[in-house]
Image (cartoon, rainbow, N blue to C red):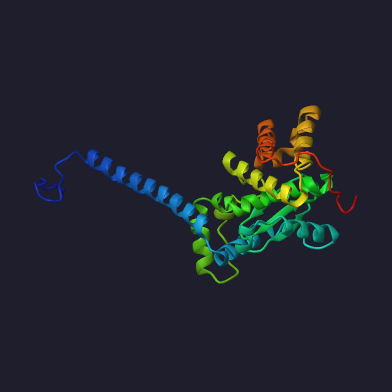
Amino acid sequence: MKYTPREIVDEVNVTPVHPLVNFGYLIGTVVLAAVALYVGLGVAGAQIAARMGPQAESKLGEVIFENVFSAMPLTTEGPDYEYLATLAESLKSDALEQRPELKLHILAEPLPNAMVSAGGYVYVTQGLLDDAQSENELAFVLAHELGHYEHRDNLRSLGRSLVFLSLNTAFAASGVQLPPFLTGSIGLADLHYSREQEQRADVYALEIMHDRYGHVDHALDFFERLNEEELDLGAANQFLEWQSTHPLTESRIEHLEELAAQRGWAVEGAPTALPNQ
Ligand SMILES: [Zn+2]
């Protein structure tokens, strides 16, 4: 028997407009909803970063540490560690007293680098310790990271992921395994701060240097040495990792020299020796 479709009658289920126009509206609505969700997540992430309390930040820090950093070759003992932990404590601003306490780790990694992660986790590579020639330059790099910590730059850099990370830590008591797509983007070389964030962290660090040593001399030795080695020896590759997180420019050094001049800080003074020197 042959099927003969009935003539479509004019009723509510049949639209008067062309089906492609309808399809266009449908796609348009989906795209708009996706854009709204994307923007909304960005706004929510920024709000969480700016307002997260110390308890929530500690929990988030633990989860990120367990999922991302705990598998790395880390040290939290020995004379180098004790010295560095004490030094880091002495570089905290008053505002940082309200935040989760510092949890320092030395990372067995030859490239000089340092970073701070949510909840006060501070990582310093063995390469940075080996390369440092005075306490002043080591203290400056550490204080710069504490500047990022005080300004919550590390939380902000998590962006939209922060919404999901926060939900994750809020709902799960312990032993949470984050989906890899969330943790895969968090790593030593993958933090990207804006130029403004870098400058503010530098200002924090230089203020601390002045408070601690009474002058800001030798604070920038590490950066200046990197600059020279990069220019003279073409050793840029060796420092790529640091470069990706902390782009090193003449203008950055000039900016700090101007700041010292503006504030009337002494730019000459004796370096403070490292304990093993
Ligand atoms: Zn930085």
| Residue 143 point in image, percent of width and height | 70, 50
The residue at the far right in this view is 277
Specify whether 89 is left or right of 271.
Answer: left
Q: Is residue 177 visible?
A: no
Looking at the image, the residue that sits furthest to the top is 232
Q: Residue at x 79, y 36 (%)?
A: 225
Residue 227 x, y percent position in the rendering: 75, 33
Asked if residue 235 is positioned above or below residue 241 in the image, the reply reads above
* Extreme residue toward the front, this view: 264
**Residue drawn at x 16%, y 45% as measured from the top left:** 15
Q: Is residue 218 visible?
A: yes
Q: For this rendering, which residue is in front, 205 or 53?
A: 205
Compared across the picture, whether 136 is left or right of 257 comes to right
Image coordinates for residue 146, horizontal then vertical, percent: 66, 53
In the image, taking residue 68 as reference, residue 166 lies left or right, namely: left
Q: Nearer the viewer, residue 188 or 152?
A: 152
Question: Which picture quadrant has residue 74?
Answer: bottom right
**Number of numbered discs:** 0
Q: Quadrant of residue 275?
A: bottom right
The residue located at (69%, 45%) in the rendering is 206
Residue 220 sits above or below residue 44 on the image: above
Rendering coords of residue 196 (x, y %): 57, 41
Q: Nearer the viewer, residue 38 or 55?
A: 55
